[in-house]
Amino acid sequence: MKMHSRNRNVAIVGIGQTTLSSHKEDQNQVEMVQEAVINALADAGLAIGDIDCIVHGNMELFEMQFAPDLWHSLGTGALGKDAYRITTGGTTGSTLVCAADNLVASGLYDTVLAIGMEKLQEGNTTGGITNMADPLWFRNLQTGALTGTTAQEIIDEFGEERAKRAAIRYRIMMDRHAMLNPRAHRRFGLEESQAEDLMANSPQLVGELRLIHMCSQSDGAAAMIFTSEEKVKRGTKNPPVWIRDHIQVHREETIPNLFGFTKPEMTHRYAARTLFARNGIVNPVEYFDVFEMYDPSAWWAVDWLREFLLLEGDEHLRMLEAGEFELDGKLPLNPSGGVIASNPIGATAMLRAAEAALQIRGDAGAHQIKKEVRHALASGFGGTFWTALMILEKDLTGWEVRHG
Amino acid sequence: MTNNRVAICAVAQHKNDSDLWHKRFQGMLLDVLEDLREQTGFTFDEETGVNTIVSCSDDFFDARTISNNGVADVLGAHYRGEEKMAQEGLNAIGYAQAVILSGHADLVLVMGHCKESQPESRNTVTNMGFDPFYGRPVGLDYLSAAALQARAYMAKAGLSEEHLAGIVVRARQCASRNPWANARETVEAGQIMASPMLCDPIRSLHAYPVSDGAVGMLLASAERAAEFSDRPVWISGFANCMDSYFLGDRDLTANFALKQAAGRAYAKAGIRDPRKEIDLVEVMDAYAYQQPLWMEGLGFCGDSEGSRFLEEGGPGKHRVNLSGGMLAGNPVIIAGLYRAAEAVLQLQGAAGERQVPDLHRALAHSTTGAAGQFHSVLILEN
């Protein structure tokens, strides 16, 4: 395995979010984008003139806006600047972070502003997602993002009682975290005592995937500012957060991979083992202080923890059952409340990196982890099992970077 | 000198066609991919092969949310990184260059596709490019926006119907020598001036024909370029630029964004006078009036001098659009990729019947948005 190399180091120096809601009716798309951009600039202590390049992303068919970056330029501040628009479905937000990292590391741009947004209220999200499937082969089978097979697989592997309890425990934990995050969209105030009722009575979507397990559809935008080590050395308003490495792993949609007799390695595990190996991380549970995971449903989240953290058997369930993913646990998971609480799709994966960076800075507010956060992991999910995974660091030293 | 530069090792084009009803875009991309593999022998090996793919397509034209999802297999994105440039494809080359310079990858595969024959009309797609409050309800689309720009520019530069016809006559003559072009039959000036009015003053033969196409390229770091090509072409400058969104906020004939993009690309490539230092130009001329307008923006003639540039044989002298240009038909999403493909072939000396001698440096240009809201400029050297 080749070690990771980069031309120069890149830091996150500004983070801006809008509040996340089912209906942001007081703003149009441009105004919502502008709110996130203004917040990011203020957070970085920079003016729009300090930005060399803008990277924008969302899904055209969710809002039914062709080439939306052109209209949104009124809010992104791209006038007169270099600009890119890069999209990869649900992973878009993390792809934008990866792209900004690449653009700054390349030396072509010193300071890059990345913006992910979605105003799902303005379209039909499940219709839009169904429309991604091949019209000849898969579209009639597609139910948007509602995938019930994982629930059944976890039940088959661990038994109905343990599986259902794990999923609902996860869901209630996420709501507890979201209750501490004033920006989060869905904050129910769920209690552990409601678990039995929710497991039995929450409306079924597909099999044991119930309404309570599923993520929201939200309106919102996120913006992040990235700059070079040279610029950071001249001073930043807030502590910089370093991007150590990132990986993106895609896979084809073809059906044998979904229903074949031999289950292929999940892209999450491939991404994690490749990324950790080339960065010399042997035990991710020990190494990372926080994990912001793209969790579209409680069932997927429970399953994916095993893949991302390279766990075996029921290790992930035992960690969950022992409270290891709580805010005061061994590896706090989604202190923000995660995707299950808030999901403006084009911004969702960027929010994972943004929230992880805020934890490293110690600026997350009420959902800040109490112990020091030095190493953070953030993931994105999209397409037909596409993964983006990145490592964020508090310090520039202590991890090996080979400058290419 | 070339140590920190990025090479385009090979290009593959699918022939442009007005209605490839018998072929899905996946099949078009597969042809392009196999062509590239035949030329370069690249693999998808984890250690030494392509691990990063930059695709280019559009959800509206493909009628698929997350259009890259439908082509992941033919891009080779099986446990590999893939990012979709959701802009015109020339920007995919610009971004791929950054990915290699960042140190994150030493090989990048760029793959773009678009089938304009699929939607009911290109105008219904580009109408959705306007905001839902003001531009969309009044029926603006990229054709009608271009017509506003054409009228303003014709008045400013003294551009006549005869000038426009001359541009198209030459474009078709060039296209007749380009096996990848769509509209390859030559036309007479009279036919052009009598062709039906699409959107005053743009006539049907002033506009690029509906086209299906696909383009692929293999980019490599300087250290690895020789493994894949004995005639690598080097990227010496890339930049793009955004103009204002509202047409009323812009002087439609001022080339604000193009001048900035070109200026930044020239600075990177160390070009002071493009007229003397660039040997070949491929501009994205979706409509005939755009060729002289964009040549003004690129600095090959002064403001309002586009018609004189034509009269003095500027397009021939500066070897503009020897491929036939976009007027011979490329899908709008990847017209810039076709521009770059022609520039690469010319610099490699592989342009067949349309090859010209003594080439060192070429320019490829693309634009997106209504009346050229966004421009991209790529400088290539052999």
Image: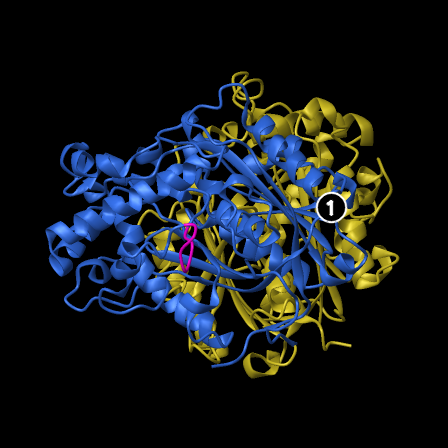
The chain painted blue is A
Closest to the observer, B213 or A23: A23
Amino acid at pointer 1: Ile
The colour one sees for chain B in the rendered image is yellow
Query: Does B348 sit left or right of B62 as displayed?
Result: right
Relative to B139, residue A148 above or below: below
How has the structure been colored for display? Answer: by chain
Q: Quadrant of the image for the C terminus of chain A?
A: bottom right
Query: Does B317 sit left or right of B66 as displayed?
Result: right
The majority secondary structure of the magenta stretch comes to loop
Residue A332 sits inside the magenta stretch: yes
> Which residues make up the magenta segment?
A327-333
Residue A163 sits inside the magenta stretch: no
Closest to the observer, B367 or A374: A374
* Secondary element at image label 1: loop
Q: Residue at x 14, y 42 (%)?
A: A207
Residue located beneath label 1 in the image? A51
Closest to the observer, A314 or A155: A314
On the image, the x and y values in percent for residue A55 come to 61, 47
On the image, the x and y values in percent for residue B202 come to 62, 29
Q: Residue at x 39, y 52 (%)?
A: A381
